[in-house]
Image: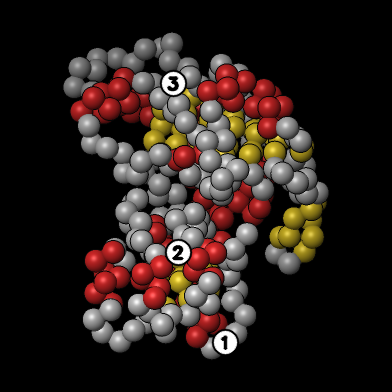
Amino acid sequence: PSDCGLKALLKGELPAILILDIGGTHGVLPTIDRELLESLPNLKVIANSGVGVDHLDLKMISSFVVKVTNTPHTVADPTADIGIALMLASAGIQVEVHNISISPGMDYCEADILGVKVAGATQGIVGMGNIRYKIAMRAKAFEMNILYHNRTQRNYVRNIGQEEQADSATYCKKIDSLLQQADFVMLVVSLTPQTHKLIRKRELELMKPTATLINISRGTVQIHWLTGVIRALDVTSLEPLPRLPSLSCIVKKLKNIVITPHLGIKTDKATYMITEEGVENILAALNGLPLPSEVLPS
């Protein structure tokens, strides 16, 4: 709910749960502050749809003995799908020739418009966890050389209840090494003080001039997104992007940017499964059971 929606709740019976449909707010995040929590003495759980909880002060919420949950298990596949889709869109010429094809002045398509070969290229994934694994498994289908960087190296991941060797990915201890080698760099990290502005001008300059940066995490993980290497973004620093004529003109003229409006998990099945996972968390909280997807303060 919006801030107005939260206040409206106070007029009726004080709730034991708050459901935050972050995926549907398109950047308009509700304010969960101390004043609100003090007004909700019956509150037991804040159920967040999606994975990211960077909009919540987990330590402050925990001080009110209120639990926070998210839905990490159901978003991995659609998030990996949008990452691969953006990679293909940025590598191919489909977006550009589509715009040319529907242009009123289009007589013919230039024969020298060329895309980038994906098969056999090097995919660099910044981040770990289930989404990274899902992306790597998809990249393997394109016979890509897969690198990853994370604070810790992991040789095994859990998949369908069994321990399996992790997708033949090569660990890069330093992010610089990954940036210098990769043809496609995909950001798959949670927004934390450590990852805020992780990719700056310096990091962009380490990348190959022909490389593509794909961001499916949070917009503020990177800066300087209008210049330099090719960008494929499902997230931006401001969401939605300001509807400024000057900004629109700049983006339209740039051929090295593909943007989608943070809708990577918006598929029919994912939306249904997110709801199911959220309900499981809520019922567990109300019945005093362990929460399947509790998010603890770090």
**Vertical order, 174 against 296 (above or below):** above
Whether residue 46 is visible: yes
Whether residue 273 is visible: no
Q: Nearer the viewer, residue 57 or 143?
A: 57
- Quadrant location of the C terminus in the rendered image: bottom right
Question: In the rendered structure, are the residues bearing label 1 and label 2 in contact, judged by CB atoms less than 8 Å apart?
Answer: no
Image location of residue 107, percent across then percent down: 24, 15
Q: Is residue 124 left or right of residue 230?
A: right
**Vertical order, 289 against 92 (above or below):** below
How many other residues sit within 10 Å of disc 1, few (<14), some (14-19) or many (≥20)?
A: few
Image location of residue 236, percent across then percent down: 41, 39
Residue visible at 28% across and 64% down in the picture: 3
Helix, strand or loop at label 1? It is: loop
Residue 227 marker: 3
Residue visible at 18% across and 22% down in the picture: 104
Q: Quadrant of residue 235?
A: top left
Residue 49 marker: 2
| Amino acid type assigned to the residue bearing label 3 in the image | Thr
Q: Nearer the viewer, residue 241 or 85?
A: 241
Residue annotated with mark 1: 288
